[in-house]
Amino acid sequence: MCLNSPVTPKILEWVAGNSNLRILDLAWCPGVRLPWRELKRLRRLSDLDVSDSPFDDADLKAAVQFSKLRTLTAYYSDLTPASWPVVLRWPSLRSFWGSTEMSGHEEPEGLPETTQLKKFVALNARTEWFERLLSRYPHVKIFQM
């Protein structure tokens, strides 16, 4: 399901009523806080796309609590490099799409020794910083688009 018009908390609650939903693409306005706990109702949800949205570090922490995603697409979002430990510790996540906002000057603190992540896709971003960060995880493949 692709909802490119501004999603409100009520719309996400309505969407969560469809427990068979596997893929969800959301966009919302800055300042809106979506009730990520609703993802818990979407037991089959495997892919979430929050690209080009105000999805931030706090949203990510909430999404991890309430979902077992395999793919998170979050390029052009408000995530920061501080979210890498959360991404890398997410037990079900296998594929993550991000962009320049997820890179920085220094390596984030608290990176795990291992990760279940298999693929990172850098969209319109140079991969050097991501390659340095992810070099400790040789099974994680990095792609540039």
Image: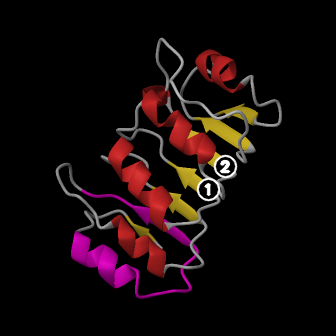
Give the image location of residue 93, x and y in percent. 64, 54
Neighbour tally class for label 2: few under 14, some 14-19, many 20 plus, Cα within 10 Å: many
Residue for point 49% across, 57% down: 64
Q: Residues within 10 Å of mark 1 (few under 14, many from 20)?
A: many
Q: Is residue 56 visible?
A: no
* Residue corresponding to mark 2: 95
Give the SS element for disc 2.
strand
Can I make out residue 28 in this image? yes
Q: Amino acid at mark 2?
A: Ser
Q: Which span of residues is magenta-colored?
A: 9-28
Circle 2/circle 1 CB separation < 8 Å: yes
Q: In the figure, 99 relative to 25: above or below?
A: above
| Vertical order, 21 against 53 (above or below) | below
Q: Position of residue 117 (x, y in %)?
A: 70, 45
Q: CA distance from mark 2 to mark 1?
A: 5 Å
Residue 18 inside the magenta-drawn segment: yes
Nearer to us in this view, 138 or 125: 138
Closer to the camera, 118 or 2? 118
Question: Horizontal and vertical percent for residue 139?
Answer: 82, 36
| Residue lying farthest to the top in this orientation | 105
The total number of labels drawn is: 2
- Identity of the residue drawn at 66% across and 49% down: 95
In the displayed structure, 43 sits above or below 133; it is below
**Which quadrant would the C terminus be assigned to in this image?**
top right
Residue identifier under label 1: 71
Occupied quadrant, residue 96: top right
* 57 in the magenta segment: no
Q: Which residue lies at the image location 27% right of the left edge and 58% below the top edge? A: 28
